[in-house]
Image: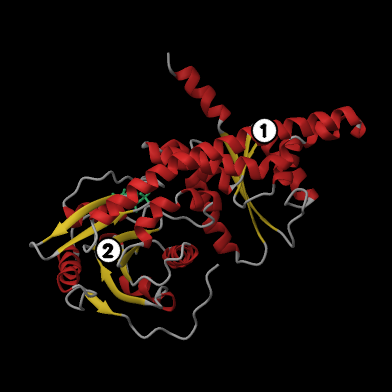
Amino acid sequence: MNSVPAVEEQQANRTYLVGAFTRETRESAEASLQEMEQLCLSAGLTVAGRELVRLRTPNPALYLGKGQTERVIETVRELEAPVIVFDQPLSPVQMRNWARRAQCEIYDRHGVILEIFSRRARTREAKLQVELARAEYALSHLAGMWQHLSRQGGGSRLARGEGEKQIEIDRRRLRERVTRARAALEKITLQRALRRDNREGTRKVALVGYTNAGKSSLLNALANARLRSADQLFATLDPVTRRLSSGPDTTLLLTDTVGFVRNLPPELINAFHSTLEEALEADLILLVLDGSDPEAPVHLETTRHILNQLGAGEIPVALVLNKLDRTADPGRAEFGLRSLMKDTDRVFRVSALTGEGIPQLRHELLEGAGNGAGAETGAGAEKKAPAPVDHSPPQ
Ligand SMILES: Nc1nc2c(ncn2[C@@H]2O[C@H](COP(=O)(O)OP(=O)(O)OP(=O)(O)O)[C@@H](O)[C@H]2O)c(=O)[nH]1
Ligand SMILES: [Mg+2]
C-alpha cells in the first residue's frame, strides 16, 4: 500500500549531479563530487547520474558553457530527473537561468547542506539556527527569483512592476524571519554564556573536525557516554558536554560539536556561531580526523581553515587520528598529513570503535586537567614532528 507514494517520491527526487573543475586536478574534483553524492543522499535525493565538466572560466549566466549546458539538459531529460544539483555554489542568476532552461529544481552545494541541516535539526536552538541560515540564504538569492516576471512582456512597465513588487514582499517576509530567529537565538546564547560562567575554572576540551570523523563516538569512548553516532553526514548539530574526571582535582569538560565540510555555507557558519563558541572558548581543541580516509589531508585543511575563520586559530590543537582499526597503512596515511600538521602540539592514534589508544588519550587529557597546563607527552602521544617547509595556504 505504501509502495506507490514511495516510488513517486523516488521519482520526484531523481537527481542529476554536476561537478566542474577549472584549475584544480580532476582527482580532487572527483573526490568532491563523491562527497557531494553522499550529501545528496543525506538530503533525501536519489542520484540517477553524474558528470564532471572541465571549465576554462565559469560562464556568468549559466556557470557551464552553452554547449555543456545543452548536453547536461539533454541527459537530464533522458534520465527523467526533475532535480539538478551542482557541486559548486551558484549565483542566484545562474540558478534562475538553469531552472528556466531545464525546467528542473536546482540546488547548489550550499542549498543541499542547508537541506540536510534542516532535516537533522531536533532541538529548538538547532531549528532556529537552521531557520536563520535558510532565511539569509533565501534573501541572498532573491535577486534572481522573480526575474522571469520582470522580463515578461518584453519588459513592459506592468510586468516589471509585478516582479519587483513580489521581490519586495518576499524580502520583507524574509527579513522578519531573520529578525525573529536572531532575537530568539540571542536569548539562548545568553543562557549558554551563563552556563559557561558556572563552569569557570574547569579545563575545557572541544572535539572538532570533519563530519563523520568519529567525534561523537570518541566522546562516548572517552566519557562512557551514549551520544548518537551514525554513519551519516551531520549526525550532530547540537553541542553536548560531558565531564571527564579521575579525582576531585582532575576534571575537564569535553564538548562534541557540529561537523565541518568543504564549502560550508557562510550563512550556516554565522547561524551556528553561538554553538561553535563552545569550541572557541576551549583550552584545547582535539582535532579529530578519520585517519583511514584518503581525503584526510583535505579534511584537515578545511577544518583548520574554518577554525581560523571562526577566530579559533590560536587555540592549542592536538590531532586525533581516529579509525585506526581500519587504517591499512597508518604510516602512509600520516605522511600526507605531515605538511599540514603545523601548529599541532600532539598526535594521538586511536580507534573509538575498538578502544585502542583511548585509555592513553584519556590519561593525557586528565594529566593536562590536573596540572592546569597542556597535557604532557607520554604513551600514545607524540610531540609534533618537525614539519617540512611546504605549508600550502588554506583553500
Ligand atoms: N571503523 C571505525 N568506525 C568508526 C570509528 N569511530 C567512529 N566510527 C564510525 O564512523 C561513523 C561516524 O561516527 P560519528 O561519531 O557519528 O562521527 P561524527 O564525527 O560525530 O559525525 P557528525 O556528527 O556527522 O559530524 C559511525 O558509523 C561510527 O560508528 C572507529 O574508530 N573505527
Ligand atoms: Mg557527531
Residue at point 55% right, 53% down? 266
Residue at point 13% right, 65% down? 250
Helix, strand or loop at label 2? It is helix
**Quarter where residue 351 is shown:** bottom left
Residue at point 54% right, 49% down? 267
Residue at point 62% right, 40% down? 138
Give x and y (percent) for residue 41.
47, 40
Helix, strand or loop at label 1? It is helix
Q: Bin the neighbour count of mark 2 within 10 Å (Cα to Cα): few under 14, some 14-19, many 20 and up.
A: many
Colour style of the rendered protein structure: secondary structure
Give x and y (percent) for residue 122.
37, 36
Amino acid found under the numbered disc labelled 2: Leu
In terms of sequence position, does the residue under pointer 2 or pointer 1 come before the other? 1
Give x and y (percent) for residue 167.
72, 34
What residue is shown with label 2?
324
Amino acid found under the numbered disc labelled 1: Asp
What residue is shown with label 1?
170
- Judge by depth and name the residue closer to the eye, 284 or 187: 187
Give x and y (percent) for residue 79.
64, 35
**Quarter where residue 339 is shown:** bottom left
Task: Please identify the residue farthest to the left as the structure is shown.
Answer: 247
**Under 8 Å from ligand 1: the CB of mark 2?**
yes
In the drawing, does residue 209 fall left or right of residue 32? left
In the drawing, does residue 184 fall left or right of residue 230? right
